Image (cartoon, grey):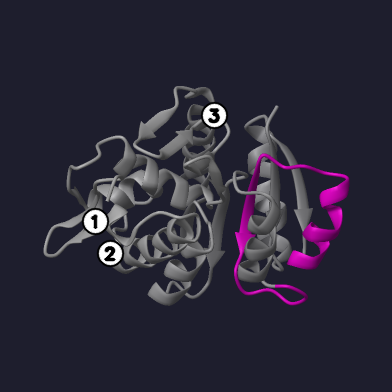
Amino acid sequence: MKHIAVVDDETALRNNLSYALKQKGYEVSVYANGQEAWDARGKVQPDLYVLDILMPRMDGLEFCKRLRDTDKSTPIIFLSSRDEELDRVLGLELGGDDYMGKPFSVRELIARIEAVLRRAEGDREESAPIEAGPLTMSPGSYKAFWSGREIVFTLSEYRLLAALASAPGTVCTRSSLYNAAFPEDSFINERAVDSHIKRIRRKMEMAGAPKAALETVYGLGYRLGSAEE
């Protein structure tokens, strides 16, 4: 039985969503704000968070940032009454897996929860390592190494780089990379891809990778270049 944490300051929304999820067979915990959910982490380990952005006592973005410092893989679906591009991009850049604006269809949200959980389970089951020169990635554990030195990525960063590493030397478009990082989100945002690439580059360079390892192909997208340069 999968465990879903619903974190939102709207009582009616928490209750309605909790009821609908329980009817689908999920175990559910509800919290009125990010601080309550954070304090409960020592006792409860959800399989997925449904996380409101605008909340008192630790908002959703801050909760996500803290969670991703220690937990790269537990999926997060953001909710927000402000369906603004900035909120969407910030949430996804911090490590969210999907985003829905309020008001929303409970049926659609549950469908997205199920899709995200299936994707996360598929990621864990895929155990064949990906190797591209000095870069090695282990999908089953979400670990990446450059010449034996571990690089810590968020789940979305990992997925994006894995798409590039699976076809070294091949140009990947921004839309294909976005779909790899956020497969459940139909909203393609090139800005989010560019921001992810910047952070991936910085982390790779800190591990000793040359700047040419991750190339920008202007007007097309990105590719994992020659790892020997």
Q: Kindly check if marks 3 and 2 are in contact, taking CB atoms under 8 A apart as contact.
A: no
Tell me where residue 99 appears, x and y as whole percent.
47, 58
Q: What element carries label 3?
A: loop
Residue 25 percent across, percent down from the top left: 67, 29
Q: Is 151 a magenta residue?
A: no
Number of marks in the rendered image: 3
Q: What element carries label 2?
A: helix
Question: Which residue is nearer to you in this view: 52 or 141?
Answer: 141
Q: Residue at x 73, y 73 (%)?
A: 58
Q: Which amino acid does label 3 sit on?
A: Gly
* Image location (x, y in percent) of residue 125: 52, 23
Is 185 left or right of 6, judged from the image as shown? left
Residue pictured at 38% horizontal, 73% vertical? 85
Q: Distance between the residues labelled 3 and 2?
A: 27 Å
Q: Is residue 109 above or below residue 143?
A: below
> For the magenta stretch, what is the residue range?
34-58
At 70% from the left and 27% from the top, the residue drawn is: 1
Residue located 36% across and 61% down the image: 197
Mark 2, residue position: 190
Residue 184 visible, this orientation = no
